[in-house]
Amino acid sequence: MTNTPPLGVRLNPDIQVLEGRELSYKARVRWTDPATKKRRSASQVVGSVEAAKAWIDAMERAARGGLDPSESTKSLTEYGTAVMSLALRGLEPKTTEPYKAGWTKRVVPTIGHIPIRMITSGVVDRAVHDWIADGCSMSTIKNTVAVLVRVMEQALRDGIVDRNPARVVGWQSEFRKAEDELEDPRALALPDWETLTRLADALVERSHDQYRGWGDVVRFAACTAARIGEVSGCRVADIDTRTWTWKVRRQTTTGPGGLVDKGTKGKRARFVPLIPEIRDLVLNRLTTLDGKPDARLFTGPKGGRISTAVLRDATHWDDVVRVLGFEHLRRHDLRHTGLTWMADAGVPLHVLRKVAGHGNIATTQRYLHPDHQSIIEAGNALSAYLTRDETTGPQLVPGSNSTADELGSVIQLKKAR
């Protein structure tokens, strides 16, 4: 690395309190560059004084190890771009291409904004889970994790981190479990509006001070088929009450020192309809916020950002769903619920894909599987047709467009031949 200070360079640390901000602590270190004799500094805004102290400790360890502290403040994207050729040395071209694709298409959009020193095993675990949820294949995830391992291994050699957090294990079993679930996301959906209402009310009842906002978040997420992070990122200006649509622009996700806002998973804004069942809810929230365009439509009881973990802990989610008989239900299944309901309502596949923001249409198609009763009825219709008098030839019920009738006609014609 360049501009490396001599061992033992002394840093002057301090922590500033930033009033009125969600990330309210600014950790800073200053030092004198031994080569230029100029005064330099590096800083990081975090969510707690503990996080600020931890950041300063990391900077001091880097300085004692002979590393320029400013190198430790680089984001994963900045650092990876600088060392990529070094990290991939010795690999065949046929291997480097999928590695680079994994870096560009998955690592950078998901965790590239996080400072290299703030990458932890937990951050990598959540990123891998996101890639699994997005429907990436096992080989794609394997290549993506491999390039991340190599970049973080270079950071380990440079002394920026003291261990390689990208060497996560067990994700293959999580992949197989998620793959089984994603093959039939309909099985994860709530059955109807009454059940959703019962869930929302029960979560409010278990929360501290019975905060109604938790119920609003749950109803809104299910009826818009949105991720909890996207619900948290919704601002007043994103809601159009003339057309009753929501422009999904951003999501709240884990970042260094706390929760941060970034673009949606697909990196594109999309429009989602706001159905009449939640319009009063939305109007009440807009009235409370007095039309401030940058205000969050949904927040915690103290005005903070919401995440799936915050919702879980604040509402005792796991206990509530177990009592209601939905032990399997996760916060993300509210999204499965909305997409399943839309599919059953007859929303065309290409429209459902736009609402969901899916990159791969095969992911959307999973929501179109017929329910169990439809399968039974199709089987009964086919059986009834095959036991009819074959001498009458193919017959269609006048005005019928059913798939069962059409299928029966094809079979009867083949038999007549």
Image: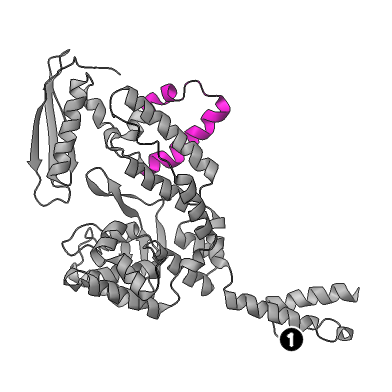
**Secondary structure predominantly adopted by residues drawn in magenta:** helix
Percent position (x, y) of residue 146?
A: 46, 34
Q: Nearer the viewer, residue 85 or 383?
A: 383
Say which residue appears at 14% left-offset and 43% top-offset: 50
Query: Residue beneath label 1, please?
Result: 397
From the viewer's perspective, tell me whether residue 159 is left or right of residue 334. Answer: left
From the viewer's perspective, tell me whether residue 71 is left or right of residue 149. Answer: left
Residue 89 in the image: above or below residue 129? above
From the viewer's perspective, tell me whether residue 167 is left or right of residue 391. Answer: left
| Secondary structure of the residue carrying numbered label 1 | loop
Percent position (x, y) of residue 90?
A: 50, 20
Inspect this view and state whether residue 241 appears. no
Asked where in the image residue 196 lies, by quadrant, the reply is bottom left
On whether residue 99 falls in the magenta region, the answer is: yes
Residue 252 in the image: above or below residue 165? below
On whether residue 106 falls in the magenta region, the answer is: yes
Say which residue appears at 50% left-offset and 60% top-offset: 181
Name the residue type under label 1: Val
Residue 134 in the image: above or below residue 148? below
Q: Nearer the viewer, residue 126 or 337?
A: 126
Quadrant of the rendering where the N terminus is positioned: top left
Q: Nearer the viewer, residue 212 or 262?
A: 212
Q: Which residues are magenta?
A: 81-110
